[in-house]
Amino acid sequence: VAALVGLASISEASSQLSFVEQEPVDNYGRRLTGEGSGWGGFQEETTDKFCLENRKGKGKFNKCDDHKKAQQWRFTEDYTKDEYLYGGQLKSRLDGGCLEVKGGKIRIGAKVRVNECDKDNDMQQWISDGDSVGPRHKKKFCLYHEGESVHKLDDVVLMKCEKTLSFNFGRK
């Protein structure tokens, strides 16, 4: 995934992603428990039609489908400290890889990808209160869609978080 051509292309109107827990089911419609539980998806909040998908190792938007493994993610830690509900790495159900900020720098417009999980990689550490998701070490950024509307296979990028009562990442 290439970096954005220029910051001028970043629009003020963008859609923040929120984590929605799911109850995954098997091919017969039975609810999975144990190893299959705890998975969820990331929906953009304005239309609820598009979700974060592991698309050949890239973080892309696609039409939401609760049964699609490529759209199911799980936080690796039971992270109930502070005001955050979730934390740690974001593991993809599709291939077991972890979501990370591409390029090793957390900045506006940075894209995300799925890579081999590495607990020591700061680019793979995330936190969430359920409404927003952002890098653990740069709390003013959140996963977003850039632009005025979401389209199939658009990139998921980092943008400055919208200020909300439940998830104001502040000025760190």
Image (cartoon, grey):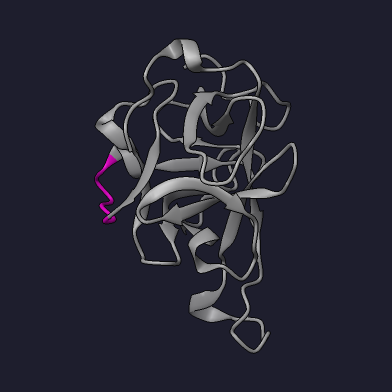
| Nearer to the camera, 86 or 108 | 108
In percent of width and height, residue 121 lies at 26, 43
The answer to whether residue 1 is magenta is: no
Q: Residue furthest front?
A: 152
Q: What x and y, as percent, mark residue 134?
A: 50, 35
Question: Residue 94 appears in which quarter of the rendering?
Answer: bottom left
The front one of 23 and 171 is 23
Main SS type for the magenta part? loop
47 horizontally vs 96: left or right:
right
Which residue sits at x=52%, y=14%?
171
Would you place residue 84 above or below residue 94 in this image? above
Q: Nearer the viewer, residue 52 or 154?
A: 154
Percent across and percent down for residue 68 are 56, 67
The image shows a total of numbered marks equal to: 0
Residue 17 vs 88, above or below: the answer is: above
Q: Is residue 162 left or right of residue 89?
A: right
Viewer can see residue 80: no
* Residue 98 in view (yes/no): yes
Task: Answer left or right for 116 relative to 101.
Answer: left
For image coordinates 48% across by 38% down, the residue present is 155
For the point 39% across and 28% down, which residue is it? 110
- 93 or 1: nearer the eye? 1
Q: Residue at x 75, y 41 (%)?
A: 47
Q: Which residues are magenta?
A: 116-121
Given the current orientation, which residue lies at the most extreme top position? 8
